[in-house]
Amino acid sequence: MTRRKKTRSLSDKVTIRTGRRKDYKQWRHDNPDQIGPSRRFSQKKRQQRKLQAARKQARQETGQPIDIHPDNSHDKDD
């Protein structure tokens, strides 16, 4: 008896008549609401993005401002 290969694909989690790709495509077509990331995953990613944005904002606020074009007086000294 051979062991089944472990996979992370969504197709193995779907209980359909056969394991053929054509049947999985048909199931996806029939059940569009069950496709996509889980609600828990989406909430986790949204929280991570909020934290990342807050950290970036804090870094920008604590940084020193840089004068990109200081008053160019050294060019006109000649």
Image (tube, rainbow, N blue to C red):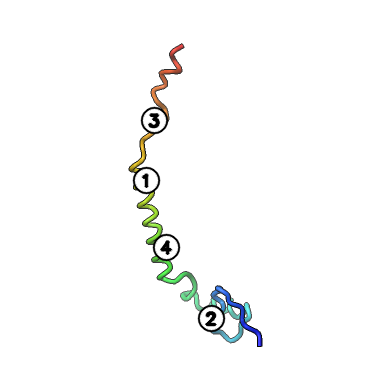
Foreground disc of the pair 3, 2: 3
Q: Quick one: label 3 or label 2, which is nearer the N terminus?
A: 2
Question: Can you name the residue that lies furthest to the top here?
Answer: 78
Instruction: Write down the residue under mark 3.
Output: 67
Foreground disc of the pair 2, 4: 4
Instruction: Write down the residue under mark 2.
Output: 14
Q: Amino acid at mark 3?
A: Asp
Circle 1 crowding by C-alpha within 10 Å: few under 14, some 14–19, many from 20: few
* Numbered badge on residue 45: 4
Q: Amino acid at mark 1?
A: Arg
Q: CA distance from mark 4 to mark 1?
A: 21 Å
Q: CA distance from mark 2 to mark 4?
A: 24 Å
The quadrant where residue 75 appears: top left
Q: Quick one: label 4 or label 1, which is nearer the N terminus?
A: 4
Instruction: Write down the residue under mark 1.
Output: 59
Could you tell me which secondary element the residue under label 4 belongs to?
helix
Of residue 67 and residue 28, the one placed in the foreground of this image is 67
Q: Position of residue 18 (x, y in %)?
A: 61, 85
Q: CA distance from mark 3 to mark 4?
A: 36 Å
- Relative to 46, is 32 on the left or the right? right
